[in-house]
Amino acid sequence: MKKLILAAVVVGASCAAAFAADYGSAGCGLGSLAFKENDMTQVLAATTNGTFGSQTFGITSGTSGCNNKGLVKVSMARESFIEANYKDLSRDVAAGKGEYVANLASLYGYTPDNNWKFTQLLQKNHTTIFASNNAKTAVNEINRLVGSL
């Protein structure tokens, strides 16, 4: 249920932000650069963004027509994800695998090819990250660990 609520919030905020920015409803990324705005091509643009992960990378790096004007900031998306999925994320991190840690890795800019580095870092520091049983503390600790790489 938490995942559904989070997804609705992120999608709603992204759609609202897309209309405020210089791109269509598919958002920024490679797809928005390749396919200009009309109803049918926005489907292709969204598919391209999702397939290649260019939107996540673009938002993180400020490339592919992405910027933080009118968009949910990546840091807020990370924090929201951790808060909404705290217990499941803790379980996945302890196991060193799973959909929650993989999705968080993508929010931190890791690809399926290198997300094992992120997962390994979190697993090694599981006790420190989740000791306080507080999502905000977990966010701060994860950011500290990722920043030290």
Image: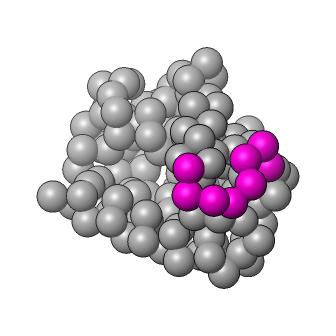
State left or right for residue 116 relative to residue 41: left
Q: Residue furthest left?
A: 1
The image quarter containing residue 71 is bottom right
Q: In which quadrant of the rendered image does the C terminus lie?
A: top right
Which residue lies at the image location 43% right of the left edge and 50% below the top edge? 129
> Residue 147's x, y, as percent?
71, 50
State left or right for residue 143 relative to residue 7: right
State left or right for residue 120 relative to residue 55: left
Give the tally of numbered discs.
0
> Residue 114's x, y, as percent?
63, 22
For residue 139, above or below residue 109: below
State left or right for residue 147 relative to residue 120: right
> Residue 11's x, y, as percent?
43, 64
On the question of residue 57 being in view, the answer is no
* Along the line of sight, the residue nearer the viewer: 33 or 29: 33
For residue 122, above or below residue 143: above
How was this image coloured? one colour
Residue span colored magenta = 33-40
Which residue lies at the image location 42% right of the left edge and 71% below the top edge? 12
Which residue lies at the image location 33% right of the left edge and 65% below the top edge? 8
On the question of residue 2 being in view, the answer is yes
* Along the line of sight, the residue nearer the viewer: 90 or 59: 59
Q: In which quadrant of the rendered image does the N terminus lie?
A: bottom left
> Residue 24's x, y, as percent?
65, 64
